[in-house]
Amino acid sequence: MLAMADSRGIVEGSIPGMADMARITIEECKAALVVLLSPDEYSRSKNDEGRRLREVEGGWLIINHADFKEKSRKRAAYMQEYRAKRNHDVTTCNHSVTPVTDCNRSLPPVTDTDANTDAHTDANTDKETRDGKPSAILIYPKSWDGSPEPLKAWNEWLSYRKPLGVAKNCPLLWQKQLDWLSSYSAQEAVTIINASIRNGWRGLFEPKSIHGQPPPPAKTDKNARIKADNAFVRAQNVQDAVKKLDHGKDDISRTLKVLNDAYRDCGVNAKGQTVATEAYEYWKLGEELKRNDKCEPALKG
């Protein structure tokens, strides 16, 4: 009904129309309206003795509609402030780290053995500049000296990895990967990089062909996991609600009201049913099965 209310909190409609929208019978709709129109001494809101609805011309008035609207407004303002702060933090982080600008370079050969320290630093350090400012420094593994294949594979890895949208320009990430690759030979590093690109991985992993290590675990869909978790929680809520209906079957209307309050934040299923309504359907089916089980021996006798 909140979704159907206008800016004044008025829901226009009839009982048959509301029943059709909620996918319930007219009798169930009437019972629900009786609960919502009745005083509730346990309600958190004391407006109008805890009633949820009031009858008006052409429909019903949601008494606490202004409160719900204000909560929604505050939530929207909070999310807007949160997104602005997050975007600001990301922008600040990107400006505080000097990006790697050009990795498509070749290592100069080491020719002067008398000045091996300076030659090693020049051969293994990336000191490219961007707009006249010093760029990040990357130190390549010593085993790559004099071998163009590892650097070529590394440049291909950067070209493949950056467009994926995670840590596009993060020198710390690249340096940690280079440090890890330094524990392998130049040819093994080429094999590792090529395997990650070929399999579409976002990280570098040791292939089974090197030391018999298993490949990385298969990717899982985060959204699918979240949907499965939500479905499991809802199923548990419905099961608990059915048990509560069975215990409170002497006053179903009262029990449904309590359940609607308890599971108000759980949303609706694909049929538009709340947890209380869905549990009520299962409870009614169970009661019919119990009656049939009792009648069947009598018929046989």
Image (cartoon, rainbow, N blue to C red):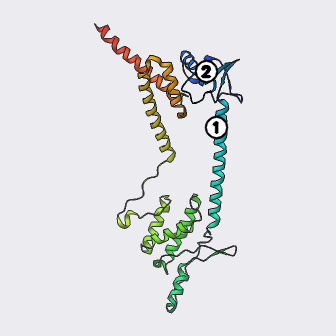
The quadrant of the image that shows the C terminus is: top left
The quadrant of the image that shows the N terminus is: top right
Q: Residue at x 34, y 11 (%)?
A: 295
Q: Residue at x 57, y 30 (%)?
A: 44
Q: Secondary structure at mark 2?
A: helix
Q: Quadrant of residue 206?
A: bottom left
Q: Earlier in the sequence, mark 1 or mark 2?
A: 2
Q: Is residue 243 visible?
A: yes
Residue 79, placed above or below residue 190? above
The front one of 124 and 191 is: 124
The front one of 141 and 8 is: 8
Left or right of residue 121, residue 143 in this image: left
**Which x, y percent locates residue 147?**
49, 78
Q: Residue 18, labelled with which disc?
A: 2
Label 1 crowd (10 A; few <14 / some 14-19 / many >=20): few
Label 2 sits on what residue type?
Met
Mark 1 in CB contact with mark 2 (< 8 angstroms):
no
The front one of 220 and 83 is: 83
**Which x, y percent locates residue 84?**
66, 52
**Residue tagged 1:** 71
Label 1 sits on what residue type?
Lys
Q: Residue 131, labelled with which disc?
A: none
Q: Residue at x 41, y 26 (%)?
A: 243
**Which x, y percent locates residue 107?**
55, 79
Q: Residue at x 68, y 27 (%)?
A: 9
